[in-house]
Image (cartoon, helix red, strand yellow):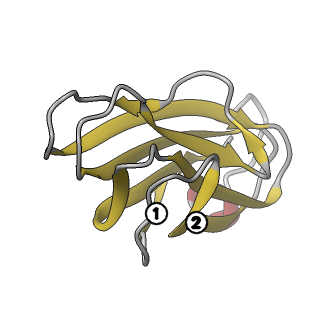
Amino acid sequence: MLTAGQELRASTCNRFQPVRYSATASADLAAGLTDTDITGASVTLTTQTNGARYTVTATLDVDLTGATTTIVRGKLVVDGTAVRFGEALYQAEVGTDRMTVYQQWNGVLPTKGQHTFKLRGTTPANATIRATHTNIFVKIREVI
C-alpha cells in the first residue's frame, strides 16, 4: 500500500508481486546424523527492503529401513539461526516405511540484503532423508 504523497516508481512496482525461489536436495542425509544441513536444500536471496515477509514450505522424503521410536526431524535455518517454532516430524514403528513430510514456516526478515534459508535434518540410526523429493520453497513479499 502506498502512503499519501509517496511516489510510484519502477523499483516500487517490482515489489508488488511476491518472488518465489526453490531448491532440491542434491544428496541424501544419511542415517544417524544430528542437526545436519541437507545438501542442496538451500536458497540464498537478496531483499530490497527491511521487514520483508517470508513463507517457506519444505518437503522431506523420509525413508525408514527398520522400525524406530526415534523421530526424524526437519528444521528451517534462516541466516544461520534455527527457526524456533515448527519442525517437520516423522516417526513410525514399522520396518519399512517411506513418507513425504511437509512443514511451513512464516516470518519477517528484519533487514534488507542477502539472506540464506536452508533445511537441516536429524535422522535416527535406521532412517534416511532422501534427496529425491526433498525440497525447499521460499516466497518473499517485500514491503512497498
How far apart are labels 2 and 1 at the CA level? 18 Å
Vertical position of residue 124 compared to residue 44: above or below: above
Between 67 and 9, the residue placed more toward the observer is: 67
Mark with earlier residue (2, 1): 1
Residue 13 is left or right of residue 23, and the answer is right
Crowd around label 1: few <14 · some 14–19 · many ≥20 (10 Å): many
Q: Position of residue 82 (x, y in %)?
A: 71, 38
| Residue underneath mark 2 | 43
The C terminus is located in which quarter? top right
Q: Position of residue 131 (x, y in %)?
A: 34, 68
Vertical position of residue 31 compared to residue 105: above or below: below
SS class of the residue under badge 2? strand
Vertical position of residue 59 compared to residue 24: above or below: above
Q: Residue at x 35, y 25 (%)?
A: 69
| Residue underneath mark 1 | 29
Between 51 and 119, the residue placed more toward the observer is: 119
Residue 107, picture quadrant: top right
Tell me the amino acid under the disc marked 2.
Val
Q: Are marks 2 and 1 in contact (CB under 8 Å)?
A: no
